[in-house]
Each structure stands twice: as C-alpha cells, then as structure tokens.
Amino acid sequence: MKLSKILCGALAAVMTLSLAGCGGDKKTTLVMATNAEFPPYEYREGDQIVGIDAEIAQAIADDMGLELVIEDMAFDSIVPAIQSGKADIGVAGMTVDEDKLQNVDFSIPYTTAAQVVIVTNDSPIASPADLEGKTIGVQLGTTGDNFAGEITDATVERYNKGFEAVQALGQNKIDAVIIDREPAKVFVSENDGLKILDEDYTVEDYAIAVAKDNQELLEQINTSLTKLKDSGKLQEIIDKYINAE
C-alpha cells in the first residue's frame, strides 16, 4: 500500500512538471496581417504571398528566431486584427498617420513611398491640382483614400482592391486613381492606355504597425529593422523588387 502511494505520488509530480512545461512554452510564431493586393510590396505568386513587405517581415522573424505566418485580409481589417490580438504586426505599405496612431503604434520607417495619380493617356488631368471636382478611385482605407477625401468637390469611389480602381479607370467609370507609386507602375505596365502623372501627389513613410500595449515587440521590431538597415539587407530587399520594374 505504501509503495503504491509512493508511485502514485511520483507519477503526479511528473505530470505536474509536464503540464508546467507546456504552459511555459514561449511564442514561436510572428503573425503578420497584410493585404496581398499591393505589388510589389505584397502580392500572390500561386499560393504564396511575396513582395517587399513579406521579405522584410521574414527577415525580422528570422532575426527574432520566430516562424512567420502571413494572414491576408482586407486593408481596413489590419488595424482591428492587431488590436484584437489576431495578428502581431501589420506590414502592408502602411503610412504613419494620426488616425492610425490613435489605435496602433508604429516602428521606425523602413522605406519612403510616394502617392501618385494614374489617368488615361488622353486625360485632361495634367497635375494633382486638376483633380478638383473629378471622380477619383482609391483602395479602401489606404493613404490614397485619405487624401482623395480632402480634394475639393471630388467624388471618391472606394474599392477593396487597387486593381479594381485601375480597371474602373480603364473603363472610363472614374477620372483618376490615387495610389502608391510602385503598385502604380505595375498596374500601368499591365493596362494599356494608362499613365502616371509626373508630379507626385504626396510622399510618406511606411512602417510596421504593432499593438499599443506591446512595447516589448515594438522594441524588438525596431532592433531588427536597424540591423537590416545597417547590414544593407533592407535596401537589398527593396531593390530586388523596385529596380526590376
């Protein structure tokens, strides 16, 4: 009877240690929320999401010793996903602006981008100043969406995907599209009869979004980004996609 009690006690102790070990497991994944409709920053190649942002996030995950998991979603769902804990970071050509800063924090910038205007080749629109009173297509929730809403007397048509706005422009349903320069290059190269105006609409920084209560992760992201910048790896990733255009 005594032996049985001793064995049972030992078994219970082993089980307790085992459960404690499971409960103490460290996080092994870094979940990135993005919208894979924004080439060359993020887009699909078969079943994979690739692009500048995907490679930067992978490099950060590698530096942190984590497995990167990419979740594709609507652009305006990214911040809520971070706030709810469904994603750790948002990497999607996201501009640092006051509206987003109310809900998430941002890393140091990893690149500077420009918003441009796409029009048809025969359009009378010659500069951003000519957009007043026009019908403008944008991707919902993007920087282009924010700026288009400030144009005097403009009608803003919002689309879930950037290429849908470009398609509408090609079908003469709208007068122009405001979008990031690099995706604009891709869209114009794939659609005859369109061009990008010479004058940029605006210039902004792109950074990685992190939940406001996750300062430890934010510091880790900034440390990894600094390493990537200092080593030249960050510019190497950007040049791989942008210089190939």
Image: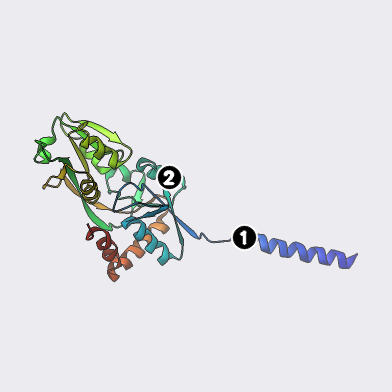
221 in relation to 122, above or below: below
Left or right? Give the position of 20 relative to 31. Answer: right
Q: In what element is the residue under mark 2?
A: helix
Where on the picture, by quarter, is residue 201? top left
Residue 195: give x, y in percent of width and height.
15, 44
Where on the picture, by quarter, is residue 207? bottom left
C-alpha separation, residue under disc 1 versus residue under disc 2: 26 Å
Write down the residue under mark 1. Answer: 22
Left or right? Give the position of 230 relative to 64. Answer: left
At label 2, the amino acid type is Ala
Where on the picture, by quarter, is residue 216? bottom left
Is label 1 in contact with label 2 (beta carbons under 8 Å)?
A: no
Write down the residue under mark 2. Answer: 81
Please report the residue visible at 37 percent of the width from the left and 60 percent of the height from the top.
221
Please report the residue visible at 19 percent of the width from the left and 43 percent of the height from the top.
192
Please report the residue visible at 24 percent of the width from the left and 58 percent of the height from the top.
242
Q: In what element is the residue under mark 1?
A: helix
Q: Residues within 10 Å of mark 2 (few under 14, many from 20)?
A: some
Q: Earlier in the sequence, mark 1 or mark 2?
A: 1
Q: Residues within 10 Å of mark 1 (few under 14, many from 20)?
A: few
59 in relation to 206, above or below: below
What colour scheme does the image use?
Answer: rainbow
Query: Which quadrant would the N terminus be assigned to in this image?
Result: bottom right
Residue closest to the eye, 85 or 77 = 77
Residue 28: give x, y in percent of width and height.
50, 60
Residue farthest along the right direction in this orientation: 1
At label 1, the amino acid type is Cys
Residue 34: give x, y in percent of width and height.
37, 49
Residue closest to the eye, 183 or 150 = 183
